[in-house]
Image: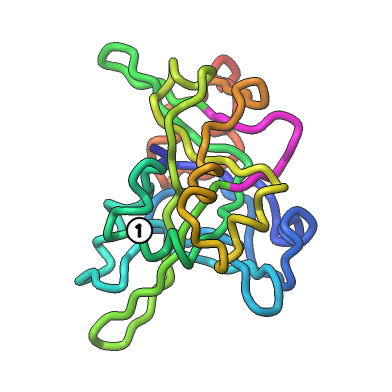
């Protein structure tokens, strides 16, 4: 799964990296947690647009926003069939920008967190889905989920799952609402190559969402 990640950049970087037509307010974040607002990139009639979405997808038929706590991730193997995700998978796909993500390795009774990122690039993107939910009182919430797949060889020792990281050349296909062929879409939902990733252990302070500072990224021996 992917339950925490970081996005250590400002809003202007989205324009260059994802060719969006607008700008949003964003400050560097070192510990993004579920239920918080996160940037996402969607394809709209005027081009790619950056928006802020609540992390934890709330399908239109959910009774309340609490549903989103169980849908922060969607499994690549079942995303086309699960009721919470299948409509968004066909029609409402998005990019979720990141500079790294965290995973916990089980070591007996202890769990060691790691920061994981793509080598040689500041910004990359997870494959995401988005949805619009409306309460009986008329409150509207736009939300999202991050698709996860099996871990690559490099990450398997830390955890058996990892978020789907898309190559830039696949952004157009993933964002295209006209592309609804499940087979074509599933081919994009693969583990990212091991040789293009790097990891290092970080402080257990990452476990608390109240901690959000540069020290969270320091290698453990320097923390």
Q: Nearer the viewer, residue 200 or 17?
A: 17
Residue located 63% across and 42% down the image: 99
- Can you give x and y, in whole percent of width and height, for residue 1 in the image? 38, 37
Q: Nearer the viewer, residue 35 or 134?
A: 134
Residue closest to the far top = 108
- Can you give x and y, in whole percent of width and height, for residue 113 in the image? 44, 26
Q: Quadrant of residue 10?
A: bottom right
Residue located 75% across and 55% down the image: 13
Image quarter in which the C terminus is found: top right
Q: Nearer the viewer, residue 142 or 38?
A: 142
210 sits left or right of 196 in the view:
left
Read off the residue under disc 1.
85
Residue located 54% across and 49% down the image: 184
175 sits left or right of 164 in the view:
right
Q: Quadrant of residue 115?
A: top right
Residue closest to the far left = 63
Can residue 205 be seen from the camera position used here? no
Picture layout, residue 30 above or below residue 11: above
Picture layout, residue 132 above or below residue 162: below
- Can you give x and y, in whole percent of width and height, for residue 86 in the image? 36, 59
Residue 59 forms part of the magenta stretch: no
Instruction: Give the color scheme: rainbow, by chain, secondary structure or one colour.
Output: rainbow
Numbered disc 1: secondary structure: loop
41 sits left or right of 151 in the view:
right
Residue located 41% across and 31% down the image: 161
Q: Quadrant of residue 118?
A: top right
Picture layout, residue 90 above or below residue 103: below
5 sits left or right of 210 in the view:
right
Look at the image and give the residue range highlighted in magenta: 115-125
Q: Nearer the viewer, residue 144 or 206?
A: 144
């Amino acid at each position: 799964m992917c339950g925490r990640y970081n996005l250590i950049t400002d809003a202007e970087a989205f324009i260059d990296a994802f060719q969006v037509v607008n700008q949003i307010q964003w400050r560097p974040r070192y510990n993004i947690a579920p239920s918080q607002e996160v940037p996402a990139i969607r394809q709209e009639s005027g081009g790619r647009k950056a928006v802020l979405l609540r992390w934890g997808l709330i399908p239109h038929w959910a009774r309340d926003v609490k549903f989103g706590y169980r849908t922060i991730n969607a499994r690549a193997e079942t995303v086309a069939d699960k009721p919470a995700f299948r409509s968004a998978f066909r029609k409402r796909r998005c990019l979720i920008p990141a500079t790294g993500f965290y995973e916990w390795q089980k070591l007996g009774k202890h769990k060691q967190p790691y920061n994981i990122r793509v080598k040689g690039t500041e910004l990359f993107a997870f494959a995401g889905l988005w949805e619009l939910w409306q309460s009986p009182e008329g409150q509207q919430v736009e939300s999202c989920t991050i698709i996860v797949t099996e871990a690559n060889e490099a990450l398997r020792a830390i955890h058996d799952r990892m978020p789907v990281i898309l190559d830039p050349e696949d952004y157009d296909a993933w964002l295209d609402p006209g592309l609804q062929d499940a087979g074509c879409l599933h081919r994009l939902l693969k583990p990212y190559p091991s040789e293009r990733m790097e990891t290092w252990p970080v402080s257990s302070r990452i476990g608390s969402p109240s901690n959000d500072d540069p020290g969270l990224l320091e290698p453990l021996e320097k923390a």
